[in-house]
Image (cartoon, grey):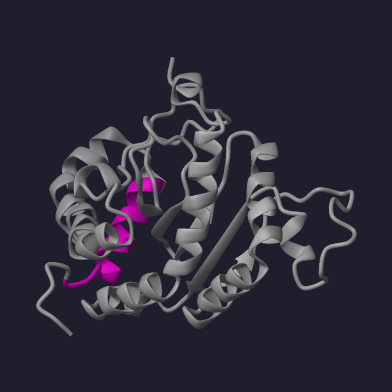
């Protein structure tokens, strides 16, 4: 284990974050702002910093700014039905700059009061665009299955939020069909042992899993670039 910036996120810091969410009070937040910063925000930014070299090696267009990659404790409730102003969960996204690459696949790390997790996600604003992933799976089935196996070796589990009800590719090989119904995908790992995020060993764990799962990110980002090259995804359509 190397000498990392990240030293851990303590149970006491997580408890304070939960208390801040429970109180949902600016006065409480201001009173404990520095404790929350040093106990939660700074360690999360340190994780981003410690992983930055690996993430740039995976994708040299990856945004790794620790400040911009980490969620804020204070929520923007404008236009949101949930008016609770403070979070009890925090996350880091490793992705290309979203204004230039909206909907690009990304790596993430997050924690909740009773669990933590990480992995690779590919969600698109327009789910029909995900058929480009289907096309690549059909064109390169062995490469796809190798990427799926890499995710399994990384400890990740396949998940899909939304699927097509009608079978789109009835003649496809059976081992590919579960993925060919998907409108989005993620390969993730979750654990309820929060003691594991209170140690710099977490960085080694994330580095190993993220690197092993690299073939899946490469597959996703190639499909995404195809969408952009075909004019399906246009940044100006999302940020006007």
Residue 176 seen in this snapshot: yes
Quarter of the image where one finds residue 71: top left
> Relative to residue 134, is residue 124 depicted above or below?
above
Q: How many marks are shown on the rendered structure?
A: 0
Residue at position x 24%, y 50% from top? 64
- Residue 74, position as x, y percentages in the image: 32, 38
- Residue 212, position as x, y percentages in the image: 41, 76
- Residue 122, position as x, y percentages in the image: 54, 51
> Which residue is nearer to you in this view: 176 or 90?
176
Left or right: 99 in relation to 228: left
Residue at position x 64%, y 34% from top? 126
> Please, what is the dominant secondary structure of the magenta stretch?
helix
Furthest residue in direction bottom, as rendered: 1
Residue at position x 52%, y 27% from top? 80
Q: Is residue 222 magenta?
A: no
Left or right: 175 in relation to 89: right
Q: Is residue 9 magenta?
A: yes
> Which residue is nearer to you in this view: 146 or 202?
146
The C terminus appears in which quarter of the rendering?
A: top left
The N terminus appears in which quarter of the rendering?
A: bottom left
The region drawn magenta spans: 7-21
- Residue 72, position as x, y percentages in the image: 30, 42
Furthest residue in direction front, as rendered: 139
Residue at position x 55%, y 49% from top? 223
Quarter of the image where one finds residue 7: bottom left
């Amino acid at each position: 284990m190397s000498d990392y910036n990240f030293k851990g996120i303590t149970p006491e810091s997580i408890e304070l974050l939960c208390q801040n969410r429970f109180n949902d009070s600016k006065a409480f937040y201001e009173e404990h702002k520095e404790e929350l910063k040093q106990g939660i925000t700074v360690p999360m930014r340190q994780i981003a910093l410690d992983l930055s070299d690996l993430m740039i090696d995976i994708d040299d267009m990856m945004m790794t700014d620790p400040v911009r990659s980490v969620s804020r404790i204070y929520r923007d409730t404008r236009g949101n039905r949930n008016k609770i102003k403070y979070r009890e969960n925090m996350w880091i996204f490793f992705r290309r700059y979203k204004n230039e690459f909206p909907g690009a696949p990304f790596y993430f790390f997050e924690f909740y009061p009773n669990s933590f997790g990480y992995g690779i996600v590919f969600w698109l604003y327009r789910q029909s665009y995900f058929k480009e992933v289907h096309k690549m799976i059909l064109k390169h089935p062995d490469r796809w299955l190798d990427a799926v196996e890499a995710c399994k070796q990384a400890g990740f589990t396949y998940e899909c939020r939304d699927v097509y009800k009608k079978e789109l590719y009835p003649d496809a090989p059976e081992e590919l069909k579960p993925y060919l119904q998907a409108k989005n995908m993620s390969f993730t790992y979750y654990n309820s042992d929060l003691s594991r995020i209170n140690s710099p060993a977490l960085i080694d764990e994330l580095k190993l899993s993220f690197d092993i799962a690299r073939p899946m990110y490469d597959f996703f980002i190639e499909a995404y670039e195809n969408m952009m090259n075909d004019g399906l995804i246009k940044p100006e359509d999302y940020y006007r």
